[in-house]
Amino acid sequence: MLPRTPLARRLCAASAVLLASAASVKAVRGSQKPYAPQAPAYREKGRPEAPIVIVEFSDLQCPSCRFAVKPVKDLLQLYGQDTRLIFKHYPLHQHLLAWPAAVATECAGRQGRFWDLHDLLYDKQADWAPQASKEAQASVKQPPPPPDFIPYARSLGLDLTAFAACLKDPTVSAPIAADLKDGDDHWVLSTPTFFINGKRFTGARQLTEGGVPWIDKILKKQ
């Protein structure tokens, strides 16, 4: 039976629109796939089937990212085989040396030594990426020449000829650009940003204070 009054008909129509909108939103959500981050195998740690997946968006020139290295390692050690770490590059535009550093770690990764150079560059960050003043950064019109990463590669025993050639290979930047887009798509605004099974944590403090309870909650449901 149709509503008898104009007001009743309008209310009925409005309700139908709301119900249709809700159904549409539910359908869209149902069709969306969960976040499934991808990275080269050399940028991952842990078992592929681990129930806890930690995705880290990081910048090798970022001091806060350097401070997060130990908390991340502590978390992996605490939960062992239950965790999987995926590292993704997110070089911030104000860090002019972050991109070449990312390229260098990708080149080390091609020789199976990504994590070794990752740790070394964070450990030596003050040497290859001294923090410039804001005035100096603002005055830079051209990116500075990339640091000489060859001594770091040599200290790790890498094939220096292959490493040097890789640094000049333009295709090495493709996975870095893909990570950057992935971060933008997921509203990464600062580094380091972590996603633990899809839940966001920004910075080492949030990772430690919020990440542990969140992981415990997930594992209790297993």
Image (cartoon, rainbow, N blue to C red):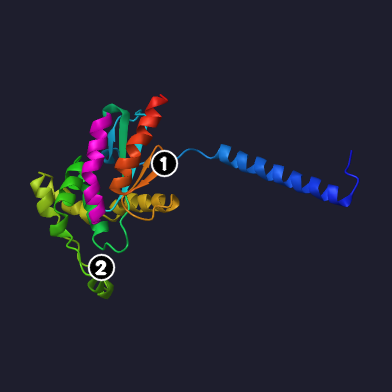
In the rendered view, does 94 fall on the left or right side of 188? left
Q: Position of residue 206 (x, y in %)?
A: 33, 45
Amino acid carrying mark 1 in the image? Lys
Whether 74 is among the magenta residues is: yes
Within 10 Å of disc 1 (Cα), the crowding (few <14, some 14-19, many 20+) is few
| Mark 2: secondary structure | loop
> Quick check: 201 above or below 93?
above
Circle 2 sits on which residue? 143
Q: Earlier in the sequence, mark 1 or mark 2?
A: 2
Whether 198 is among the magenta residues is: no
Q: Quadrant of the N terminus?
A: top right
Q: Which mark is residue 199?
A: 1
The residue range painted magenta reads 61-79
Majority secondary structure of the magenta segment?
helix
Q: Are marks 1 and 2 in contact (CB under 8 Å)?
A: no
Image point (15%, 50%), residue name: 123
Q: Which mark is residue 36?
A: none
Image point (26%, 29%), residue name: 80
